[in-house]
Amino acid sequence: MASDRSRRRALALAGVATFVVIVLYATGGVFSGLRTAANTVVEPFNWSVNEVARPIGHFFAGAVNYSDVVSQNQKLRYELGKAQQQSNQLWSYERQLEQISTELNVPFVGSLPTVAAQVTTLSPTNFAATIDINKGRDQGILTGMPVVANGGLVGSVLSTTPNGATVRLVSDTSSSIGVTFGSGAVDIVVSGRGVNNGLAATSVPLTTTLSPGTFLATDGLQGGLFPAGIPVAKVATITLTPGAATYNLTLRPTADLRHLSYVDVVLWEPSA
């Protein structure tokens, strides 16, 4: 009897144990399934967040990098601009030095002292042709002194201030210059005809042998306005009037009066 009860108890315990095992197994499976289901549901959201966040991160990183690139480009442009400015300044200085050297190449003044001056104003008209320069009485410049540039005579000092002067050009209609050529045996008076009309000489004796291209220079006569030997003009044309005992000349100034930036004032006064 007792053994039957023991057997039934054992079978009951075994059944309970089996039930518990089955329940635990089922419960674990459900929880595992829930976790899997939860992961399955959440995973797309994780992917979406990652995929959305990744471009945003790239955007911010790109924005920072782009800002750096812009800043570097601006700095490079600034440095390039400075280098270009320095290059332009150097080129300007070189051109200015070349221009000064060219325009002040006046070996024809010999040992006479000169004062280099910059042209500050060009004021030519059809009749009055003058320029202003930035040197004057304080630099030893006086009225009547010759003014030269590369090529020859530019004119003479018309008036002065302490630090400036006005120069009458050889093309001015009131300008008259004594010139000669060749051996210097013949003297000719050259007159200005206005800015755009060059120079002229009239009443040249027929006995004077001249041809186009002949150079005329200051004669340096006693009491003359200019020292001898400064180039003034070159013969352009010769006009002979039938029956006349003289002929006329049209002349081109040897100095380039249209492009004057620097000149030399010759510190010379005519002797009495």
Image (cartoon, grey):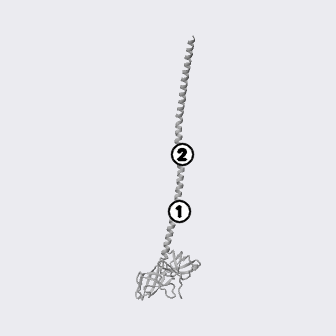
Please tell me whether residue 187 is drawn above or below residue 163 in the rendered image. Answer: below
Q: Residue 23 occupies which quadrant of the picture?
A: top right
| Pointer 1 local density, CA inside 10 Å: few below 14, some 14–19, many at least 20 | few
Is 110 in front, or is 220? 110
Q: Secondary structure at mark 2?
A: helix
Q: Position of residue 104 (x, y in %)?
A: 49, 76
User: What's the amino acid at mark 1?
Assistant: Lys
Q: Secondary structure at mark 1?
A: helix
Q: Residue 12 occupies which quadrant of the picture?
A: top right
The disc at residue 13 is none
User: What's the amino acid at mark 2?
Assistant: Gly
Q: Which residue is mark 2?
A: 57
Q: Residue at x 53, y 62 (%)?
A: 82
Quadrant of the drawing holding the N terminus:
top right
Q: Position of residue 24 (x, y in %)?
A: 55, 25
Q: Position of residue 143 (x, y in %)?
A: 56, 82
Q: Residue 157 occupies which quadrant of the picture?
A: bottom right
Quadrant of the drawing holding the C terminus:
bottom right
Is 149 in front, or is 28? 28
The disc at residue 82 is 1
Sequence-first disc among 1 and 2:
2
